[in-house]
Amino acid sequence: MASEVLIQARGLTRRYGPTVAVENLDLTLRQGEILGLLGPNGAGKSTTMKMLTGNLAPSGGEIEIKGISLRENPKAAKRHLGYLPEQPPVYPELTVDEYLRFCAGLHGLPAGEIGAALDSAKRDCGLTEVGGRLIGNLSKGYQQRVGIAQAILHRPPVVILDEPTVGLDPIQIREIRTLIAELGKTYSVIVSSHILPEIQAVCGRVMIIARGRVVYHENLSALQDQAAQIIAEFRRTPDIAELGAVLGVAAVEGMGENRYRFTPTTEVDPRESIVEASVRNGWGLIELHAQNRSLEEIFVELTSADLRSAA
Amino acid sequence: MSAVLSIARTEWRRIFLSPLAWAVLAVVQFIVGFVFINLLLQYAAAAGSDESMGVSDYIGGSLYGFATILLLLVMPLMTMRLFAEERKNGSITLLFSAPVSLTEIVLGKFLGVLGFIAAVIVLLALMPLSLAGATHLDWGRIAAGLTGLFLLMMSFASAGLFVSSCTREPTIAAVMSFGLLLVIWLINILAFNDSVPFKELFGYLSLIDHFESLRRGVFNSADVIYYLLFSGLFLSLTVLRLDIERA
């Protein structure tokens, strides 16, 4: 946790007229982290990323990149950023090499380093073979890679990728995913997506945004530790009131054939007490396991509840 | 500064990668060449009848005077894409998220177009140059005409750049900048109307009135400053326009 804070956003708010796209969002990104931004369509993911990269001025709040305020000193702050927007920002009439050379110039790379930067970015993104081809003639997947190459060309500490796998075929998606995981070893990455397995595959930390607010923010490892529900099966039918009274159980419901689902309280893991209660009362416990909540369940629960309350 | 040059170089390259630039250059060259030959024939037919009119007057005066109208028609086509197309295909994000200021972006684009304008000027200079071996030319007069055309096109480009930054449709940018330029061009007709108050002011604001003295071979710094101010105004308006876009 001692690693350097690269992005610090506080109270980020963005309004489009009367519509609030993002409200009071806090975000911290540390060195060597891959943060996943999840949310249904229109939740404010892209708006957040546009604000973080200086493409959109926030209506309220502050963004600091490596301790430099994006509002007061945008040029210095943007030096540490690489950004791939939803649509790869490429010029179809240029070749890959010409385009990347232009990007290197934009980021002020010294002339002597441009060649080496181009080579390593192309190698990282699997573009070595297509350097001389026109971007307009490349497939969507390759154009996306050119977009990623553009974002990492100047070796920025922070790489922000907005839905990097949209419109790609399954094999390309896997390749891009591997690339992102690879990037995460050297850079700090923020990835947005509404595809859950993608986030689960590459990210260390997730932030779920719904209707412009952060509704969930947790390390993925914490998600695995947290036993959300406990399933137990007994040989004889226990008294449901007694089951509910077991220490650490917040709620219990029958699933039929002597199977029960327990929702634990947040403080105590009730599994031990369930075993003790079963022995004491002679219920004959034959199965007991904790069911981890998947990201998908959390996502559906948080975002659909939100939609219901809005409706 | 290197970012400005980087943007300018790429913009210049992209202009010449599109067939539009070559088509425009070809059409301009063909039409101006046609008028050029016609003027030469006229001059040859009337040779000696008017001692005060030399061949340089024909080229510097009539030919370059005619070229202004043609350039008014084609410059909006060359500036329409500058920002509109970038916005349309999303590549403008590249410039906005790079560590360059809006002023640098605008100057870079503008310099890129100036590169195209330089090509037009070279092509227009070729015509009197073809006569250099055969007759004596008043080079100062022709240089003044070309300077005037350069300044005029620079003003067209800056206004076109601004209009292009206001929309995402290149064709709308072309129509609107043509309209804007024509209005500023024609504003001098108010100067001939006695019922209009401050009528001299409108004559002074018009784009074409300042070309008149350069066309006649008079290099008046006030005219040059007018064109520089005109371009500066529209370039700064473009910076403001792009800044509003992020807010």
Image (spheres, grey):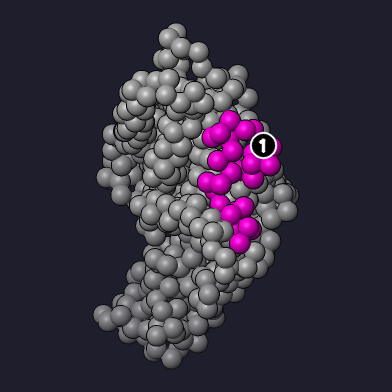
Q: Residue at x 39, y 20 (%)?
A: B47
Q: Which residue is mark 1?
A: B220
Q: Main secondary structure of the magenta part?
A: helix
* Image location of residue B62, percent across then percent down: 44, 33
Towards the viewer: A105 or B43: B43
* Image location of residue A6, percent across then percent down: 66, 48
* Image location of residue B117, percent across then percent down: 48, 32
Determine the secondary structure under disc 1: loop
Above or below for B55 versus B243: above
Q: In screen coordinates, is A235 left or right of B239?
A: left
The residue under label 1 is which amino acid type? Asn
Q: For the view shown, which residue lies furthest in the bottom direction? A: A241
Quadrant where the C terminus of chain A sits is bottom left
Towards the viewer: B48 or B214: B48
Can residue A35 be seen from the camera position used here? no
Total marks shown come to 1
Magenta highlight on residue B226: yes
